[in-house]
Amino acid sequence: MPLWLWFLDSLGLVVAALALFLLGLVVRRRLIARAGSTFDLSISFRHGPSPRGWTLGVGRYTDNQLEWFRVFSLSWRPRHRFDRGQVEVLRRREPHGTEAFSLHAGTTIIESRTDAGPVQFALSPDALTGLLAWLESAPPGRNADRVI
């Protein structure tokens, strides 16, 4: 078989693998959304404004946890889990400078403290309203007063 046919076969396999990966991402996202309310949520474990450290993801509410999944991953398990009673919202702000290029347009950043340390959440204004309502709706005795 000529060398160029080997090249075309290899190229076809790479394209097929890429198509399967993209299909896997779409199927995974739809199955994650089936199990609960989901929204676009970027997170950063750095403190203060910085274009580095932001990771795109999807947030999903459960009864007492906020689960976070990476966008470009095939894992069915959440990468991070935040307990409702352990998230303390410190302040909200708009992205500064080059930080805005790392995030979706129109996002608001929430600086918070969790049992794992400081975390920043970047989300749309509608998703922010939902997150604050979810945090405030904790059952009695669950630190529902930790929201600004």
Image: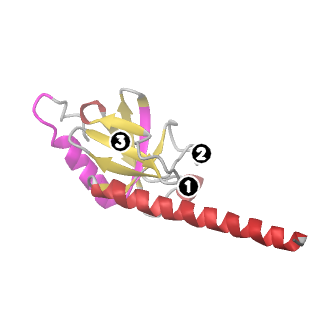
The relative height of residue 42 versus residue 6 in the rendered view (above or below) is above
Rendered residue at 36%/31% (across/down): 114
Q: Residue beneath label 3, please?
A: 91
The relative height of residue 14 versus residue 83 in the rendered view (above or below) is below
Count the labels in the image: 3
Q: Residue beneath label 1, please?
A: 102
Is 56 left or right of 143, judged from the image as shown? right
The relative height of residue 5 versus residue 139 in the rendered view (above or below) is below
Residue 37 colored in magenta in the image: no
Inter-mark Cα distance, 2 to 1: 8 Å
Near-viewer residue (63 or 17)? 17
Is 33 left or right of 85, judged from the image as shown? right
Tag 2, which secondary structure? loop
Amino acid on which disc 3 is placed: Arg
Which mark is on residue 40?
A: none
Circles 2 and 1 in contact, beta carbons < 8 Å: yes
Q: How would you rate the neighbour count of disc 2 (Cα within 10 Å): few for under 14, some for 14-19, many for 20 or more?
A: few
The relative height of residue 4 versus residue 48 in the rendered view (above or below) is below
Near-viewer residue (45 or 35)? 35
Q: Which residues are magenta?
A: 118-141
Rendered residue at 24%/39% (across/down): 147
